[in-house]
Image: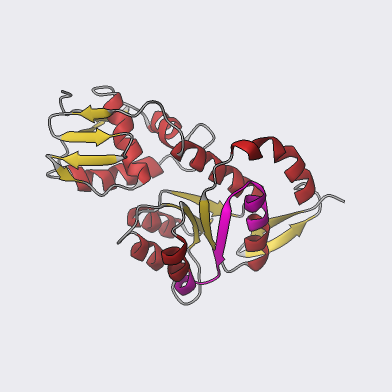
Amino acid sequence: MQGGVRLVAGAVELEFFALPPLAQFFQSQTVYNSITMTYKILFVDDELTLLNTVRAYLEHEGYSVQTATNGRSALRIFREFQPDLVILDIMLPEIDGLEVLRQLRQSSDVFVIMLTAKADEADKVIGLGLGADDYMTKPFSPRELVARIKATLRRLGSGSTPKELVSAHMRLDEGARLAWRDNQPLDLTPIEFDLLLTLMRHHGRALSREQLIEQVWGYDYYGDERVVDVHIGRLRKKIEGDPAHPTLITTAWGAGYRFEDEMT
């Protein structure tokens, strides 16, 4: 009998027809193992069944995985493990996920996927405001999460020949993934850097939320398009002299966002 695991209302529920067993999933994914980079992933959730199932999927894909079941141990393991990506549940014992995220952002721009309950719209907005790069809403299947992680790491590890993009006030080094405003270094998260890079590449052209999601999050993204607005707001706070009256990244009402600074 085929089986799987699905998170429902904060608990893990066994489903005996919705998902294929691990062995079948592994057989179908073997072709990708030879090209998977050895990325390090920290998965933080207090649901042990979900934690162990997703870890098994990820380790078979070739990733190095560490897990934590509370916020305090998550921060300790993060310092020791230095992961490339963090999956972080909001509802955690000892220290909640939002506080863990806040502390992570004090010293790291690691890619963070927040896990939120469907009813917790406010937590989703707060998490993105604190610097989460992406989110997934429960319930979801482990395979769905693994697919999101693979797509994210594929984007972070890909790219064309690195080059510099320079405007009157901004400079981006694609290869080093560094950015400066008037020769002052900027502390950007991966999503913020990719948003700025995409807008600078299309200087003077209004890009819609959908276009930005395709370029930055990928074609397989299926979350809320409003995530773009949150990250643009955070980016403006870092690069604009007056974020309330932006001159570098402007809003084209009804069309999207546009990079206006003169390219050199």
Tell me residue 151's x, y (percent): 53, 39
Residue shown at 57%/54% (left/top)? 64
Instruction: Name the residue at the right extreme.
Output: 1
Q: What span is in magenta?
A: 55-73
Q: Taking 264 as reference, is 223 above or below it? A: below
| Front residue of this view, candidates 238 and 249 | 238
Decide if residue 253 is in sight here: no
Q: Taking 49 as reference, is 256 above or below it? A: above
Decide if residue 16 is in sight here: yes
Residue 67: in magenta span: yes
Residue shown at 15%/25% (left/top)? 262
Q: Taking 136 as reference, is 93 above or below it? A: below
Q: Quadrant of the C terminus?
A: top left
Q: Name the side, left or right, on which 176 lies relative to 77.
A: left
Residue shown at 37%/43% (left/top)? 191
| Front residue of this view, candidates 138 and 184 | 184
Instruction: Name the residue at the bottom extreme.
Output: 94
